[in-house]
Image (cartoon, rainbow, N blue to C red):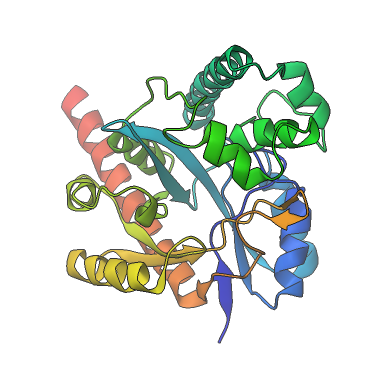
Amino acid sequence: MLYADLHTHTTASDGTQPSSENVRLALKAGLAGIAITDHDTVAGIDEALAAGTQYDITVIPGVEISTVSEGQDIHVLGYWIDHTNPLLLQRLSSLRDVREQRNMMMLERLNELGLQITMEDVLASLQASKKADETIGRPHIADALLKKGYVASMAEAFERYLGKGAAAYVNPPRIEPLTAIEWIREAGGVPVLAHPGLYNLDKLIPQLTEVGLAGLEVYHSDHTPEQEKHYRAIAEQLGLIMTGGSDFHGERGGVVFHAPVGARKVEMSVVQLLIDAKQTTSKLLFSDKGEDEGAQA
């Protein structure tokens, strides 16, 4: 069997490895494919595609879009997107602006709690300098807290300060999951709900399926066997593609976050299902465009 890891992050967002290294790690893990799914950016994809050619690994261009529903962070994965699409790039830029706002709000909260940490401290802790189209997120702040000695581990940083309900957690207004699905489809991609076991919002899945959700990340490093069984059943019932991935973010503080490349994987036949879904999306977009042009004629 040939396998793919469909959820990995790079230094373009909150991973610690450049995207070419993720592809090399996929080869080392015996995988045939890997997706690059950075938060609200596609900046690492071109490098990964070049590495895929070098290592003979299928690289799936992807993105993980940050949304909110009922006060809960919801992440929507987009696969086989046109990562050069100007409208998508503009939209992702707007999301990074919100992410920057959130980072500053969290730093203000931390300062109010007596933890002297600034954005300069966060930037100084980065393993690579950030470009304008790359993102900074909570793991970067957690890493700075760790290096300044305020916490003993990344896990403690999230439990005490940065995770949902923790002392410095904030969640400014963001787009809804439906909007992310629309953006992904308009960029020629296939929308998949990421790690549903982390949300406790199962009622959202059929609602999103009705508006174009194509898949469900059943296999994830933070899912229990019981959760995987549960979401397999939901995916089968709704006719959703069952995807999976490690959610690899690299190593921080001597610990791999969330899991190594290839720790969770799916057969390459799932990649083909995503390709088939992309082709269906492209036909629908072409049909809609034709209808619009006909109406204007």
Is residue 297 shown to the viewer in this render?
no
Where residue 169 sits in the image (x, y, percent)? 48, 27
Where residue 57 sits in the image (x, y, percent)? 69, 68
Residue 91 position (above or below residue 154):
above
Residue that lies at the very extreme toward the bottom in this rendered image: 1
Report the residue at 52% width, 44% height from top. Answer: 63
Left or right, residue 163 beside residue 148: left
Report the residue at 56% width, 48% height from top. Answer: 37
Q: Nearer the viewer, residue 186 or 91?
A: 91
Left or right, residue 215 beside residue 104: left
Left or right, residue 232 beside residue 49: left
Residue 134 position (above or below residue 280):
above
Q: Which image quadrant for residue 273?
A: bottom left
Residue 21 position (above or below residue 265):
above
Report the residue at 65% width, 74% height from top. Answer: 31
Q: Nearer the viewer, residue 268 or 157?
A: 157
Where residue 234 sits in the image (x, y, percent)? 23, 66
Residue that lies at the very extreme toward the front in this rendered image: 114
Quarter holding the N terminus is bottom right
Where residue 186 sits in the image (x, y, percent)? 37, 38
Quarter holding the C terminus is top left
Q: Nearer the viewer, residue 113 or 295?
A: 113
**Total number of numbered discs in the rendering:** 0
Q: Which image quadrant for residue 69?
A: top left
Left or right, residue 17 beside residue 169: right
Report the residue at 33% width, 41% height from top. Answer: 181
Is residue 21 shown to the viewer in this render?
yes
